[in-house]
Image: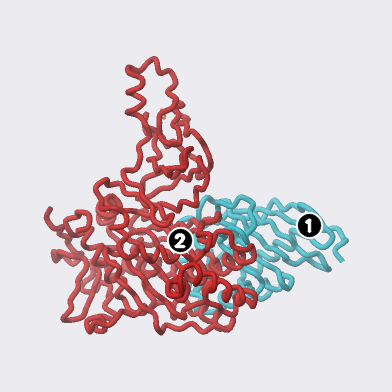
Amino acid sequence: MTQLTHTDPGGTPNRSLVHEDWDALTFKVHRSAYRSPALFQQETSRIWGHTWLYLGHETEIPNPGDFKSRTLGGRPLIFCRDSSGKIQVFFNACTHRGTILCRHNEGNTKFFQCFYHAWAFSNSGELAALPGDEAYADVPGFKERHRLRSVPRVDSHEGFVFISFDPDVPDLLTHLGEAAHYMSLTAKIGPQGMQTVPGVQLYSVKGNWKLAVENAMDGYHFAPTHNTFVGYLRETGFAVTDDDQYAYDLGDGHGLLILTGHNGRIGMVWEPRFGPEEKERIAAKRQEMEQRLGKELAAEVADASRILFVFPNLLLFDLEALTIRQIEPVEAGRTDVRAWQFVETGEPDEVRALRIKTMVSFVGPGGLATPDDIEAYEAVQRGIEATADSADPAWDWSDMSRGMANEKQGNQGRSIDEGAMRSFWRQWSRRVEGDGTPGA
Amino acid sequence: MGRRTVTRAEAEDFLYREAMLLDEWRLDEWLALFEEGGRMEVTTTDWNGWDSSSAGAFMCDDHDLLKARVKRLKSRKAHAENPHSRTHRMISNVIILEQGDETVWVAANFIIHRYRDNQAFSYVGRYEHVLLVDDGLRFRLRRSIPTMETMAPGARLSFIL
Ligand code: FES
Ligand SMILES: [Fe+2]
């Protein structure tokens, strides 16, 4: 396939919306990448149509028959556990004439019955009931041809379930690459495992999905944007620092920030706001972790906070507590967000309560910090209208060159630089502006 | 204390006055409507009656967090609320659910219109509060339960719902 040619608003044909210059040490992204409906369509097919996407966690559907309906890449899906306990992911459309089959957000069922003409499908996808079947020729064959359509690829890592709409993608662990290890670290926190809990934050922001990714990989904004949150922590007796915090390019667009001393970690690193009982529990839990994992791995799991981005739609916040955030682009200027609290299975009630209170006080549209992030994405989305088709085409680019000189010297990029964003944008460009083949 | 009967009119006065204080951003006076140790919750839209200590929530503030939230919202550095949203609260369907020895359970419906950046948002939901009854009423637990299925685009909870 030939490279796409975009015409920038200044009228100069430009091969790429992502300009990287290691002599001048500049990295720029053209702002149409956040605005253009045509590009949004290309992303939907070239990224969302051809790579692994995070769907949900196995613990959301713990029992046979449990289901959630969920839209991913704009496609309505049913995420369920069939009666034999196997995870199934179906397109949520009746095979008869396309009606949304399951109109509930969640529940438990053996059969999904379409209300329109009453076809009924088992939770493993067979067309189990076909009313008035005498009017069809070859009923068994007809039923077989009209079983529920399964998403071509479904696989999971540490309970995180991913799907692909393209059958010809590399296997999940190949896609995850180094990111798999960091998901495994998080999964090792609880001696009985980790799970999601009900109480899902569903919200939507008026900003392009890539702004949400950039924001999560951007330590530079933390001090100014979250000034009031930093002030709150200071009053509780904890001083946030930006020192000793690094950004890692995990390849294929996946990114990681490792934040040491950025915040306490419930069960692992004490902070005054957690209270004295938690201090004692942390000491005991460390012993448990060292016995279970060995000293070195226990330290790797426990000592530093991590923000992991798995390209293109999963953010795993392993901070004071844990949040799984899924981003679902809806249009160029709108992104739906779903966020789950991720907790230790079997932990004491008071720890669970502390965990939820602490995490919710930071993340989510009602936290003391995330609303300012949302303000940032939405303010960017509004601001970039200013330079569209501007007198000087150079004005319509956003700069992400912070830390390139340091990177060129071969030093590990700091979280307060923009290296993690640059690796994301490189992958984006390979996917959307390259020849579009998986892994290209 | 608390043995007196709370009328719907008294509960309405309390809720209307609270709405006024919030719409006028008189947050210190609003905070004084809580008893020491009083809490605030905003449930998620999939809420099914569960306790906020065992499930996710949009807000789950103990008294210290409530104070921190007010302090933040009064700061010019609370970017999501600088400038402040304009809010306009309508409260109706006030019901005394149950009166106990010390407390009264009050439910009400709300519609909060919020305006910012030339955009309009409306938040529809229900309150289920536990109020301490002394010579007046004070929040022991202030709980907002959104009725919407999700927060609409741009409809964040950077203010007090
Ligand atoms: S469309 Fe579903 S049964 Fe006809
Ligand atoms: Fe942030």
Q: Output the chain of dot 2.
A: A
Q: Quadrant of the C terminus of chain A?
A: bottom left
Q: Residue at x 56, y 56 (%)?
A: B44
Query: In the displayed image of the protein, which residue is found farthest to the left?
Result: A2
The chain letter under disc 1 is B
> What SS does tag 2 mark?
strand
Give the color of chain A as drawn.
red
| Residue bearing the label numbered 2 | A324
The hue used for chain B is cyan
Residue A111 vs residue A27: left or right?
right
Question: Residue B32 in the image: x percent, y percent?
Answer: 71, 73
The residue positioned 32% from the left and 18% from the top of the image is: A138
Q: Is residue B154 visible?
A: yes
Q: Nearer the viewer, residue A417 or B14?
A: A417
Q: A418 above or below A205?
A: below
Kind of residue at disc 1: Ala
